[in-house]
């Protein structure tokens, strides 16, 4: 155990320390400017050369403020302006715009790192995968938890038999969305921009994808219930959502999510011999709580937060692009999450079991 704790921060995925991937960042909201940009600036294998936004004036202003060489509009991006200045794009726009930018990037022969969920519907996600595969451009979905050291160490422990055979999973992800952003017209509450809903698309995907990564088991069937109560949530079906998923090998998973609740993130995996819990799990400094027999240990990294997770994510992506290596959370991996999310919504609407 001591050797494992001492290696908490190790990059078990890294294959190169040479080269640089130059990024164009699309969608200059707070997540991109406050988290993605400093994460790349702090990375070993990346640099930001281009900002892309709704207007060239906004993009140029933000580029000047942040020491970035180029600022262009989305229209100019589609026309190929400044394309010699970047090797890859990061898509941080509302979900329903991801496909159009991925299409242009594929035409420009640029690698693509696309925020999760990868699109607003399964059909559009399928098209993105086809476009990128036809153009032979790398496509990675930005699951930052997969490069978080706490999650990767949890995966090692599961593979080493720490919990025995996995039996059950409980995941919760909730936040007070309107306290964070009081605008009731925001895109996460607009199904035309967000997709099937708000809570499962934006929050539930963390529990689902992290479980798929940790256990390497896929959901086979799902039951769910969801409802909305607040006026701001009247256009989306899932202000509150709860789902029961049957995974391969008889593993059962319960996931609950809400965009209008006390902030809480946790993921607990129980096996025949032990338990691993991430709490907090998805936002903040992830802590591992390990239990086996009568022993309980908490492992934490005080200085590792979302920006650090994103730095690891960008360096992982760059490592794969520079070496032409396999990307694990690729487009087909993200497409499976979209199918699971759609099934959760269909199960709630039909009040029946939906098979995947």
Image: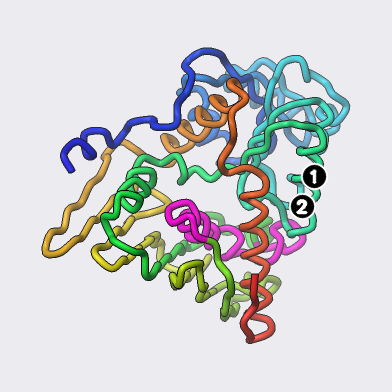
Q: Tell me which corner region of the image, top left, top right, bottom left or bottom right, holds residue 240.
A: bottom right
Left or right, residue 284 beside residue 53: left
Q: Is residue 104 left or right of residue 261?
A: right
86 or 7: which is nearer to us?
Answer: 7
- At mark 1, the secondary structure is helix
Residue shown at the point (74%, 59%) measured from the top left: 122
Image point (77%, 38%), residue name: 132
Q: Residue 245: image x %, image y %?
A: 52, 72
User: Where is residue 345 shown, x and y percent of the image?
Assistant: 65, 73
Category of crowding for the residue at label 2, using alpha-carbon neighbours closer than 10 angstroms: few (below 14), some (14–19), many (at least 20): many
Question: What residue did someone put label 2 on?
Answer: 126
Q: Nearer the viewer, residue 134 or 149?
A: 134
Q: Quadrant of the C terminus?
A: bottom right
Mark 1 sits on what residue? 130
Task: From the image, give the main secondary structure of the stretch colored magenta.
Answer: helix
286 lies above or below 231: above
Residue 64 visible, this orientation = no
Element at label 2: helix
Residue 271: % across, % down: 31, 66
Instruction: Please indicate, yes or no, whether residue 184 appears anywhere in the rendered image.
Output: yes
Q: Is residue 21 left or right of residue 56?
A: left
- Magenta segment: does it hold 199? yes
- Residue 195 is a magenta residue: yes
Residue lying furthest bottom: 351
Residue 126 to residue 139: above or below = below
Please report the residue visible at 24 percent of the width from the left and 63 percent of the height from the top.
Answer: 274
* Magenta-highlighted residues: 189-217
Q: How is the image coloured?
A: rainbow
Q: Quadrant of residue 277?
A: bottom left
Q: Quadrant of the N terminus?
A: top left
Report whether 339 appears left or right of 254.
right
Marks 2 and 1 in Cβ contact (< 8 Å)? yes
């Amino acid at each position: 155990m001591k050797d494992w704790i001492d290696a908490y921060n190790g990059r078990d995925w890294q294959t190169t320390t040479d080269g640089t991937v130059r990024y164009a960042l699309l969608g200059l909201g707070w997540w991109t400017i406050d988290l993605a940009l400093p994460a790349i600036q702090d990375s070993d294998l990346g640099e930001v050369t281009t900002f892309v936004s709704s207007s060239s004036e906004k993009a140029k202003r933000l580029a000047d403020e942040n020491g970035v060489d180029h600022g262009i509009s989305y229209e100019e991006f589609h026309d190929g302006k400044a394309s010699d200045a970047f090797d890859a794009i990061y898509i941080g726009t509302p979900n329903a715009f991801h496909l159009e930018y991925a299409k242009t990037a594929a035409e420009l022969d640029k690698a693509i790192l696309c925020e999760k969920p990868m699109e607003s519907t399964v059909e559009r996600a399928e098209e993105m995968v086809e476009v990128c595969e036809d153009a032979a451009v790398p496509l990675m979905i930005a699951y930052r938890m997969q490069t978080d050291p706490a999650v990767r160490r949890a995966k090692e422990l599961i593979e080493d038999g720490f919990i025995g055979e996995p039996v059950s999973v409980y995941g919760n992800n909730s936040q007070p969305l309107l306290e964070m952003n009081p605008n009731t017209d925001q895109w996460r509450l607009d199904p035309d921009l967000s997709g099937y809903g708000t809570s499962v698309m934006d929050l539930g995907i963390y529990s689902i994808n992290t479980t798929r990564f940790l256990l390497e088991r896929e959901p086979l069937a799902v039951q769910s219930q969801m409802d909305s109560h607040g006026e701001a949530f009247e256009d989306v079906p899932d202000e509150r959502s709860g789902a029961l998923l049957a995974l391969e090998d008889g593993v059962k998973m319960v996931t609950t999510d809400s965009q209008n609740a006390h902030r809480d993130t946790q993921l607990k995996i129980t096996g025949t011999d032990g338990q691993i819990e991430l709490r907090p799990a998805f936002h903040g400094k992830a802590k591992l709580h390990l239990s086996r027999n009568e022993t309980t240990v908490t492992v934490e990294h005080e200085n590792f937060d979302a920006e650090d997770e994103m730095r690891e994510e960008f360096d992982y992506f760059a490592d794969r692009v520079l070496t032409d290596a396999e990307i694990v959370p690729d487009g087909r991996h993200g497409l499976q999450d979209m199918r699971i999310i759609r099934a959760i919504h269909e199960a709630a609407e039909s009040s029946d079991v939906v098979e995947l």
